[in-house]
Amino acid sequence: MNNVCAVIPAYNAERTIGVLIDGIKKYIPLRNIAIIDDGSSDRTSEVALSFGVNVLKLDRNYGKGRALKTGFEFAKLGGYSAVLTLDADLQHDPDEIPKFFDKFNEGFDIVIGNRMGNLKPMPIERIFSNKTTSFLISLRTGHKVPDSQCGFRLINREVIEKIKVKSDGFGFESEFLIKALLAGFKVGFVDIKTIYNGERSYIKHFGDTLKFVSIYLRSFYSNDFLELKNKGEKF
């Protein structure tokens, strides 16, 4: 695919960011890669800059959602037609990028990685959290969502232009997905590897579960959700 921008939110990822960039550049040119350094205290930005990619460093750690919003704005200003998002901790294998391109070319507006085919490497608390949020989002939107929490996604420019998200933290991806489905955007899934190598997770499970519940309940009464549902179709 041409004119795709890879957006990678990164926080204290100096150990992994270079390996990730090396993998992505096989499929997306370095000039089309944007690392959003979410207030890291290590050398994440310096390592990324040494590869010649775009680096946007936030002044403090705002959260994954704010980093993704920043990357989306960069992509819109750059005139890119789609955005590919990956996590910086090597839980997403860049060699699976072609799967996303193939699925996207079938006419989907959003393509999301599905890790639920192999749960053995996934920590039990992540399995429970993912299955619960995926079930609730499926129930709310009427669309089967097998993996709502995967950050490996390919998103059409039209979606990032139309869907506005309030969350700045890890709730961003759930809110974005609910709103996109309510708006009628076509979402597809591709099976990907489930990779957990003991990396530190920056998701605070209890707090982020409460935030998801808040977003989910708000989807039933808040105008920013209801306006999408009432239209019943894409903008």
Image: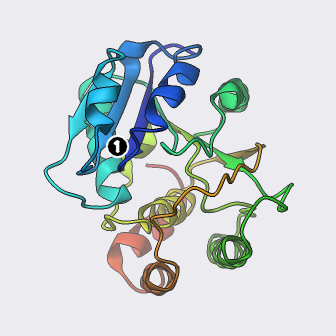
Above or below: residue 139 compared with residue 179: below
> Measuring 58% from the left and 16% from the top, which residue is drawn there?
27
Q: Where residue 14 sits in the image (x, y, percent)?
A: 39, 38
The amino acid sitting under disc 1 is Glu
Q: Nearer the viewer, residue 12 or 188?
A: 12
- Could you tell whether 69 is left or right of 214 in the image? left
- Tell me which corner region of the image, top left, top right, bottom left or bottom right, holds residue 161: top left
Q: Nearer the viewer, residue 226 or 57?
A: 57
Above or below: residue 215 compared with residue 100: below
Q: In the displayed orientation, state which residue is furthest to the left.
A: 59
**Residue where numbered disc 1 is placed:** 161
Q: Residue 25, can we see it?
A: yes
> Measuring 51% from the left and 66% from the top, which residue is drawn there?
174
- Could you tell whether 95 is left or right of 78 in the image? right
Position of the N terminus, as image quadrant, is: top right
Q: Where residue 172 sits in the image (x, y, percent)?
A: 41, 63
- Could you tell whether 34 is left or right of 114 in the image? left
- Tell me which corner region of the image, top left, top right, bottom left or bottom right, holds residue 9: top left
